[in-house]
Amino acid sequence: MKVAVRLIGALAAIAATGFSFVAEAGDAKAGKQIAERWCQSCHAIGANQPTAVTEAPPFATIARKPDFDEAKVAAFLLTPHPKMPDIGLSRESAADLAAFIASQK
Ligand code: HEC
């Protein structure tokens, strides 16, 4: 039992370090380049871009959500999910994208 508790503590510590790393690493300029290449076909990525034709929410809409959290978006982007292609983003690229999305508020 004690071992399990310690293990959970260790995992939590690793997760916390990982997320703070993600939060620090975000570079919105690099994120914009990735978004232009990989996200623009579905999402409106910038304020002056015409709305995309899919049901994908514009990045500005995502950034304005009351519960928007840059670190959470970066973590979200690391896991493949329905409708979005899994482009195998690195942790750094995910953080850059999250920073770019945050800058579209
Ligand atoms: C093939 C079309 C497609 C591509 C390409 C795509 N997305 Fe999406 N994305 C979607 C759709 C559709 C949703 C809405 C998901 C849903 O409602 O199930 C979504 C949802 C999201 C969300 C969650 C929004 C929320 O409400 O929390 C984020 C963040 C996101 N996309 C970021 C990205 C990023 C960053 C890229 C580029 C790496 C990208 N997407 C590429 C279609 C796409």
Image (tube, rainbow, N blue to C red):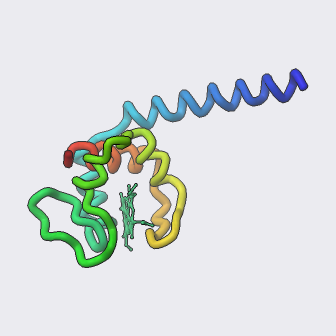
In the figure, 50 relative to 102: above or below? below
Quadrant including the C terminus: top left
State the count of labels: 0
Q: Nearer the viewer, residue 43 or 20?
A: 43
Q: Position of residue 2 (x, y in %)?
A: 87, 21
| Residue appearing at x 39%, y 49% in the figure | 93
Percent coordinates x, y for residue 3 in the rendering: 87, 25
Q: Nearer the viewer, residue 102 or 38?
A: 102
Q: Is residue 25 above or below residue 31?
A: above
The residue sitting at the bottom extreme is: 53
Quadrant of ligand 1 in image: bottom left
Of the 4 image quadrants, the one containing the N terminus is top right
Name the residue: 37% across, 35% down: 25
- Residue 69 drawn at (x, y percent): 38, 40
Report the residue at 54% width, 28% height from top.
Answer: 17
Q: Residue at x 33, y 50 (%)?
A: 97
Q: Quadrant of residue 96?
A: top left
Q: Which residue reaches farthest right?
A: 1
List the single residue furthest toward the left.
48
